[in-house]
Amino acid sequence: MQDKKRILVIGGGYGGVWAGKILEKRFRKRDDIEITLVDKKPFHTLMTELHEVAAWRAEPESVQVSFRKIFGAQKVACIVDSIEKIDFAAKIARSKSREFPFDYVLLGTGAQPEYFGTPGVQGNCFTLWSFDDAMLIRHHLETIFEKAVEETDPAERGRLLTFVVAGAGFTGIELAGELLEYRDSMCRKHYLDPAETRVIVIEALPNILPILEEPLRRKAEAYLRRKGCELMISAPIVGAEAGKVILKERDPIETGTFIWTCGVKGTQFAAELGLPVDRRNRLETDAGLRAKKYPFVFAVGDGAGLLVDGRPMAMVVESAHRSAEAAAGNVIAAIDGAGGREFKPNYHGFMVSIGSRYGVSNAGGLKTGGFAAIGMKHLVNLYYLFNIAGINQVWEYFKHEFLNMDSGRSVVGGFFSHKLRGYWPLLLRLWLGIAWLFEGINKIGEGWLAFPSGTKSGWMFSSGVVQAGIKVADDATSTATVAAGPAVAAGTAAAGTAAGPSQLAFHNVWDWTNPILDPQAGFVHWFKKTFMDGVFSYLPFQVFQSMIVFMELGIGLVLIGGFFTWFGAAASLALCLVFTLSGMFAWNQAWFFFAAIVMMGGGGRAFGLDYWTVPLIKKWWNGRKLARRSHLYVGEPSK
Ligand SMILES: Cc1cc2nc3c(=O)[nH]c(=O)nc-3n(C[C@H](O)[C@H](O)[C@H](O)COP(=O)(O)OP(=O)(O)OC[C@H]3O[C@@H](n4cnc5c(N)ncnc54)[C@H](O)[C@@H]3O)c2cc1C
């Protein structure tokens, strides 16, 4: 038997996941290839959104995408473990308790904060370079406000309410933007005066956001200042003590919150592997991302120290992706003997959010500020999430960023985040159900199932159209039963006012019995000809009538019982749509639509059978291979 080739990816960050996806796609059907991804966490962390979690804009789950979701039912085995050492001669990676033999290894362990040897900083500051870092800041921020509000000593209160962010790169600026918003909401909550607080960004360079062009920097700077942020530029930090930041040639700053975002370097883990690294712990590689010394070892993402035009590759997501493409391409080439790949820088731009409603971006040369930049950032995130975990993760993003935003801190404000208690629409659900049920029962009473008496639905078709199953076309039926359907024929009530014009102050401003769509209109005409007079007329009238009656009864019962409510409501919408497009639905029945839409939002979970059935069905569906492969599970896949 041919030996298996084992590919090990260490680190499921932007680089590791991207490489895993490429390898999986290529080797999906190959039994001779094993792909394993090992990460300390059971989820891929959306590092670029950590500031939102740190400052309470988004919930922690919003930056976690479980590996189960990303590689569900795929060839990549995902293992939660922390690799401590690698024996390159024996080709084995080791954690505390396990060994991972490999033929090719991709190192994507990311980065960690760099303190540049500044005395006292490490140990006296927070950092923002991992999920755990974000959670530490999050809890600290909440408690510091709680402490401050009870503090009566003005100096100590001032210290507690001073927030210092060191570094004005995108991490620092994005965090400062969030802090300003969080500060405002905490001041409202604790009856504090925002003027008592200080949010300070300290930067050693003469500019903020050096990665962006001057006009965008100016916009960002102006916005931050407008929001009350103090920007100290050309202000190197030379040290720190507990509760104090020491600056060169300036007064020290007393603070309860000191967050360091000034620099990053490759991880200590990578530095201790015994491979050549640059002065920032990044693994030295060739243009194909192969580590020096071992051609079967590759580096991707922030930990790769590839020089591009003499400068180290930028530590950003696009570098992680491009390096993953080159490294994975070279693993494929080594196994299949195809041509190798080199790293090709291809940056589409940068988007920096400053709080939830403002940002600056240079996307493919399109330089914008404000709302458009934030929109761009959301689009890029959605595109990325769709690529790694499909439509399910796109929906999750919508939920986390817009729909479940209790703080209201989103670009669309709190408009989409307010939720309705399930018992409020209960009566509406029952009423909608009863309306459909009676529609069905009434039709039975009118003889829709008494087939020997002939068609009762003929009026739904154009005059002259003969439904299948009818022996003699009888035009009279089409007019005789006009009032029998769920729809009210056009204009029936409009003419029926008892009072003469002379006694009226004014005529009806709106006749609710008007059809929603004009029955003579082009589209309605086309729909009626194609579907009603076309497709449906080929159904024997017995089948057609039974179908309508049972659909109406079924929708009614489903809605009353709150059992498969979503599907009942969707069927209700579909039926309403057919009636409307056939020119048969009137404005006084439009509430059917609106009620069905409300029911699709979980109307069956309150006092309905869906409360028990939906979780069971979800669990069953989420475990199916099809659901996991297509990312069409609901919530988390259950395997
Ligand atoms: C707040 C913030 C905002 C940012 N904003 C942007 C932005 O707007 N645009 C942009 O392009 N970039 C941004 N970045 C930078 C971007 O996030 C990084 O460049 C990117 O995460 C690098 O990807 P990576 O795969 O190298 O590492 P990471 O994404 O950091 O992933 C490393 C993975 O390795 C795992 N790991 C580490 N050590 C081990 C081990 N020993 N064993 C097993 N697993 C291990 C970790 O758990 C982690 O999952 C931002 C970063 C931060 C922190």
Image: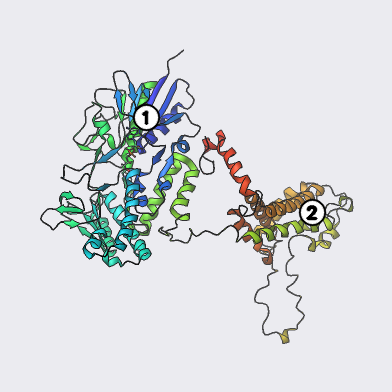
Residue found at x 58% / y 54%: 601
Q: Are marks 1 and 2 in contact (CB under 8 Å)?
A: no
Q: Which residue is mark 2?
A: 465
Above or below, 580 relative to 75: below
Visual colour scheme: rainbow
Quick one: 352 or 515, which is closer to the camera? 352
Q: Which residue is mark 1?
A: 9
Secondary structure beneath label 2: loop
Measured in 3D between alpha carbons, the distance from the residue under mark 1 to the one under mark 2, in whole angstroms, is 66 Å
Above or below, 629 relative to 218: above
| Image location (x, y in percent) of residue 92 | 33, 21
The reply to whether residue 551 is visible in this rendering is: yes
| Image location (x, y in percent) of residue 562 | 66, 52
For this orientation, the residue located farthest to the bottom is 502
Decide: few, some or many residues near mark 1? Use Cα within 10 Å; few <14, some 14-19, many ≥20: many
Ligand 1 is located in which of the four quadrants? top left
User: What amino acid type is highlighted by mark number 1?
Assistant: Val
> Hey, which quadrant is residue 296 in on the image?
top left
Which label lies toward us, 1 or 2?
1
